[in-house]
Image: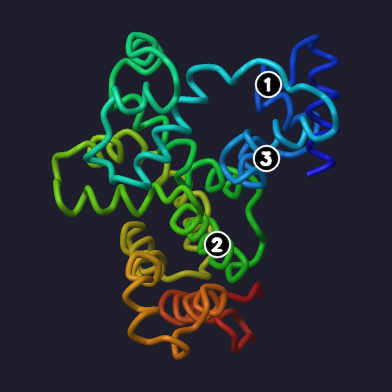
């Protein structure tokens, strides 16, 4: 955390602003990391960073902008109450802002929920991975599992709430949210998987099938985690162990043998 504090103080000094008024993007740049990495290290909220700055004897200054406060407040409410129970009134109360300001920033509830999913869903890390993909197929598959695991299991747990709403209301806010973001998710997955299809490392299956085979076991494992841990107890592999097993199973299902290699997914 100390490196992030130093980066925040440096960015604030350079911009002539209070730390709390410096955009997270600028702090991430000063720290030499991506914004998504910064958010992940902060647990999804800049509150921890502001408190760390305060402990050094520096007042972080003003409050975060309405947009950041509202997204964080809405995310916490979604995790606590579910997607369907979120109202702009509740978000405004939690974020200590006015209802008109939420309408001005997000143009309604759907816009706010879309912003929440964009920040706490898999897209930022998925696009970062697609921009600098691993060379080996097995490393790519494992990285994809870890990317989606983070969005499924990390707090606040937004993605499980999205799936719960999708299953209960196919025409509800989660469906509208996914309609906005799904093209980018599919594009990111295609950039990571299709080159391996073209090079002959993966069977030429339709991309939706490749994605379903990839994410289905992980979704089942995480979404049913409370029940599985209660019923199976010590017999249930850890999440890290499960990812290793899912990666091996996926490669056995879709990878084509490389010349002179016996392990699926290895580079020739």
- Disc 1, SS: helix
> Mark 1 packing: few (<14 Cα in 10 Å), some, or many (20+)?
many
Q: Can you tell which quarter of the image residue 105 is in? A: top left
Residue 111 horizontal side relative to residue 141, left or right: left
Real-space Cα separation, disc 1 to disc 2, in angstroms: 31 Å
Q: Which residue is mark 3?
A: 38
- Residue found at x 14% / y 46%: 169
- Residue found at x 46% / y 52%: 189
Question: In terms of sequence position, does the residue under pointer 3 or pointer 2 come before the other?
Answer: 3
Q: Position of residue 187 (x, y in %)?
A: 43, 44
Q: Position of residue 162 (x, y in %)?
A: 30, 47
Nearest the camera: 12 or 140?
12
Real-space Cα separation, disc 1 to disc 3, in angstroms: 15 Å
- Disc 2, SS: helix
Q: Between label 1 and label 3, give the one nearer the viewer.
A: 1
Q: Which residue is mark 1?
A: 20
CB under 8 Å between callouts 3 and 2?
Answer: no
In the picture, the disc for residue 146 is 2
């Amino acid at each position: 955390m100390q490196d992030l504090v130093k980066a925040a103080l440096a960015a604030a000094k350079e911009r002539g602003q209070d730390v709390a008024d410096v955009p997270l993007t600028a702090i991430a740049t000063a720290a030499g990391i991506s914004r998504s990495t910064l958010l992940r290290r902060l647990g999804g909220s800049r509150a921890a960073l502001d408190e760390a700055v305060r402990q050094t004897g520096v007042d972080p200054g003003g409050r975060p902008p309405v947009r950041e406060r509202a997204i964080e407040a809405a995310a916490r409410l979604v995790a606590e109450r579910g997607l369907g129970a979120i109202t702009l009134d509740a978000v405004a109360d939690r974020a200590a802002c006015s209802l008109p300001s939420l309408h001005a920033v997000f143009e309604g509830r759907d816009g706010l929920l879309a912003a929440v999913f964009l920040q706490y869903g898999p897209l930022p890390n998925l696009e970062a991975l697609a921009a600098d993909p691993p060379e080996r197929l097995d490393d790519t598959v494992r990285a994809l599992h870890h990317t989606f695991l983070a969005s499924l299991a990390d707090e606040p747990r937004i993605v499980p709430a999205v799936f719960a709403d999708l299953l209960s209301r196919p025409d509800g806010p989660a469906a509208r949210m996914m309609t906005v973001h799904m093209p980018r998710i599919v594009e990111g997955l295609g950039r990571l998987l299709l080159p391996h299809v073209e090079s002959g490392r993966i069977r030429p299956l339709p991309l939706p099938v490749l994605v379903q085979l990839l994410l289905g076991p992980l979704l089942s494992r995480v979404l049913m985690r409370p029940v599985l841990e209660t019923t199976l107890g010590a017999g249930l592999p850890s999440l890290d162990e499960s990812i290793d097993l899912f990666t091996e199973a996926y490669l056995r299902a879709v990878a084509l043998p490389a010349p002179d290699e016996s392990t699926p997914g290895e580079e020739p």
